[in-house]
Amino acid sequence: MEQRKEPSVHGRGAQSGLVPARFGLAGREADGDWRDHVAALDGDPPKLRTTVIEEHPRTILAFNQSPDIGFDRSINAYRGCEHGCIYCFARPTHAFHDLSPGLDFETKLFAKPNAAELLRATLARPKYKPRPIAMGTNTDPYQPIEGRYGITRQVLEVCLETRHPVTITTKSDRVLRDLDLLSELAGLGLAAVAISVTSLDPKLSGKLEPRASAPAKRLAALGKLVEAGVPAHCSVSPVIPAITDEFMEAIVARAAALGVRSAGWIPLRLPYEVAPLFREWLSVHFPERGDKVMSIVRSIRGGKDNDPNFFTRMKPSGVWAELFRARFRLACRRAGMTKERFELDCSQFRPPETGGQLRLL
C-alpha cells in the first residue's frame, strides 16, 4: 500500500474521478480537466458542489430475478448518492452514463420527480400483482436532496393510499421525517425499515460515509421507529475487516437496548470500480493497515477482491468469515436479537383511482 497522502477532496468519500476502462471511456483526473486547470492556475481547486439533474423515465419499478435477495421489485428515486460511502456497491452504475463511479457518483446526482406518478400508473394496471417494493437497494432514498424533492415521501403516500407493502433501507435519520406515514403503514402490516450502522466512531464514519447521518443519530432513529411501532432492523454493514469489525458487538448491544429485535451483517463487497476506489481510500486514511485489510478481503472472497456470484457474494467463506459469523451470532444471542423476516401483508392492496373515476368499494 502506498504512503499516506492528504485527501484530495475534503468532505467526500472518493478521492478521485476514476473512470472505468471497461467502457472505453477516456480517463480523467479528479472531477474533470477543468479542476486540474484551475488548480494549475490558482492553487487548490474549488470545493466540489452537488448538482442535480431531473430526469423523467417512463417506468419506475425495477424488477429483478436474483435468487439470493429477498425482493423482486424496487424503486430508486435517485441515481448517485451524496452520502459518499466509499464502499457503495452502486458506484459502478454511474459509469453507464459516462460519469465517474468516484466523485461524479456523489456530486452529480439525478432525481426522478415523477416517480409517484409512474408508480400510480403501474399499480393501476389490471394485471399488476403486489409484492413488497424495496426502496434504498441501490442509492439512499433519504440522502440530503430528499429534503428538497420529497420523492420518497410521495411514493410512501401512494403506497398508503393503495395499501401496498414497502420496505426501506437507509443510512439516514431523515427517515423520521416520514414517521407519520411509516407508522400508519406499519399499523396495517405494510412497512418495515432497516437502518445500516457501520461503526460507532463518528470520525471514522466521517471518512467512510462523509455525508451520511452520524452513527448516534442512526441508532436513535432505530429507537424512535420501534417506539412508533414500525418494524426496525439494524444492518451492521458493511463489515470491513480491520476497520469496522471491532464495532459489531457494540452496535448489536446498543440497538437491542433501544428495543430493536432484528439484526444482520453484510461483509464488504468491492465490485468493479469500487475496489480501486477503496484501495485509494485506504492509501489516504489507513496506509499502515491497507495491505492487511485487502488480504482479509481476498481471503473471504476466494482469493479475489470480489465475488460476484449469486449466494456466495452475500456469504463469504474461509476462516475470517467464520470468525465474523461466530462473533455476530454470539452478540445477537447475548442481546436477545434475531435476524427475523418481516412478513408484510399483500392482501390489502387496492388499485389506485385513475382518470378521475371514484372507487366504489
Image (cartoon, rainbow, N blue to C red):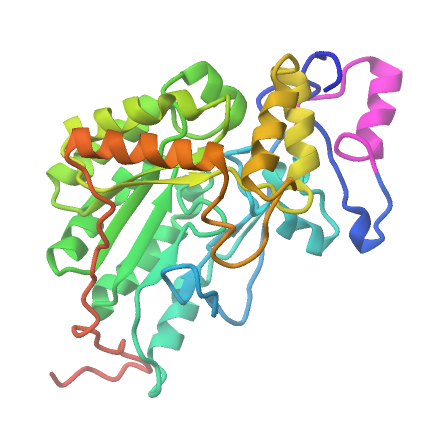
Magenta-span inclusion, residue 199: no
Residue 138 on image: x %, y %? 49, 51
Residue 88 in which image quadrant: top right
Image quadrant where one finds the C terminus: bottom left
**Residue 342 shows up from this direction:** yes
Residue 217's place in the image compared with 358, above or below, is above
At x 65%, y 48%, the residue is 92
Magenta-span inclusion, residue 38: yes
Residue 350 on image: x %, y %? 21, 77
Residue 261 in which image quadrant: top left
Residue 255's place in the image compared with 7, above or below, is below
Say whether residue 13 is left or right of residue 21. left
Name the residue nearer the viewer: 262 or 214. Answer: 262
Name the residue nearer the viewer: 129 or 335. Answer: 335
At x 21%, y 55%, the residue is 342
Name the residue nearer the viewer: 34 or 306. Answer: 306
Residue interval drawn in magenta:
28-48
At x 39%, y 28%, the residue is 213
